[in-house]
Amino acid sequence: MTATLRLALWNTVAFRRRARSLALFTIIASGSTIGLLTVGDRAVDAQQSQVAAPALRSVQVQPSPRGVGRSVLTPADLRQLAAIPGVAGVQPILSTTIGIKGKPILGVVLNPTTPRSIALPPIVASVTRHVFPLTGDEIILPAVTQGQNLRPLLGHNITITLTPRQGDHGSLALATARVVAMYDPSWQVDGPDAAYASLLTWSATNAGVSRSAYLAGTGYSAFVVTSRSVGQAGGLLQRIQSQGYYATSLLQLEVGLPGVLRLLQLAGEIGAILLGVLVLFGAASLASSSTRQRVREFALLRAVGYRRGHVFRMLVEEQLAVGLGCAVGMFLLAAILATAINQGLRGTQSLVHYLAAGLLLPPWRLALAGAILVVLVLVLGGLPSAGRAARLEPSAGLRDM
């Protein structure tokens, strides 16, 4: 350890009260910024692993729109697709139309579909912590649709209206469903009036046939075929199409983060910019004030043989020591804040899939970038004053006596 470094560390401890305000501000501001960015970063990782990555290896198979080839998707097609090499799983999708009417709902027509495991709707309210998979007569409704608030239906058994076909005519049939959750109506991947349920019985009733007859005659609305890896997805799409199926990639189903998590990301990014500017000015102001108060000290150091470079290096090392201490405090505060925000947001059903449980530590790249920014800004802020102090002559100390 050099003499200037020993002196710099001693001065940092001796004059810690002078730097306390700036250090506390830097730790709080940088810790808050890194904490917000940590939550957003972890949510992005979850979004990529739970939504984007499955979409990259998924193919949607639908009945041929031109009436040629596979115009009906039956259980036999499901088995045939599942047997293709490289297929990890096949999810059958059904859809139908239902009506809901009764106090306090004046009447809405919805188009329920099977929830796709790679693109689950964002839940805003539920009666159970684990909504998926849906079983029996459970149904998920949009919180608002067609100008009506459906939230009062949450947790209740409701009567839905079906329209069984009888020749060229339709009649009315009633069924019961239990509303277990509400999803964000801005989610319109499956249409503006979608609902989510296990639909085989309702679809068959609407068609006026038995369940087995419905699957054999009308068939599934679609299949979601998932490959074992992203690398196999392209070849899987070609193999499916070569067997006469109308198949498309599911990349368009990639969805972004919920609004509140995007807001946290934006706040962290803006905070990082403001942090750099404010800490830079704060460091410059503190260093300038400290230089004026320590003129005699610098002059005496010059008088006992310290060169200008020694004084300059000592002051830079002081700022460096303060910056490293702030970086440690930043990391600890960021971890505490990120964990607290994360746990608080996990109470919201629509966000729970994006947020992991337990202690949330900043990613090492983010922590390293934050530490470098804090140290660099503090050092840069002190450079002008360090240069002025290094240029002082020994006689300057006499003027302060």
Image (cartoon, rainbow, N blue to C red):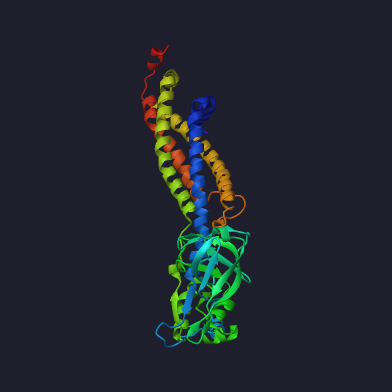
| Quadrant position of residue 273 | top left
Query: Which is more toward the observer, 317 or 277?
Result: 277
Outermost residue to the top? 401
Residue 272 seen in the figure: yes
Write the residue at 57% across / 80% down: 205
Query: Which is more toward the observer, 267 or 319?
Result: 267
| Quadrant position of residue 386 | top left
- Residue 351, placed above or below residue 270: below
- Residue 61 lies, in percent from the top left, at 48, 79
- Residue 184 lies, in percent from the top left, at 50, 59
- Residue 219 lies, in percent from the top left, at 52, 83
On screen, residue 211 versus residue 288, left or right, reads: right
- Residue 77, placed above or below residue 389: below
Residue 3 seen in the figure: no
Query: Which is more toward the observer, 327 or 241?
Result: 241
Write the residue at 46% across / 71% down: 250
- Residue 77, placed above or below residue 391: below
Tally of marks: 0
Give the quarter of the figure containing the C terminus.
Answer: top left
Query: Which is more toward the observer, 144 or 328?
Result: 144
- Residue 207 lies, in percent from the top left, at 53, 82
Write the residue at 58% across / 74% down: 174
On screen, residue 71 versus residue 340, left or right, reads: left
- Residue 260, placed above or below residue 66: above
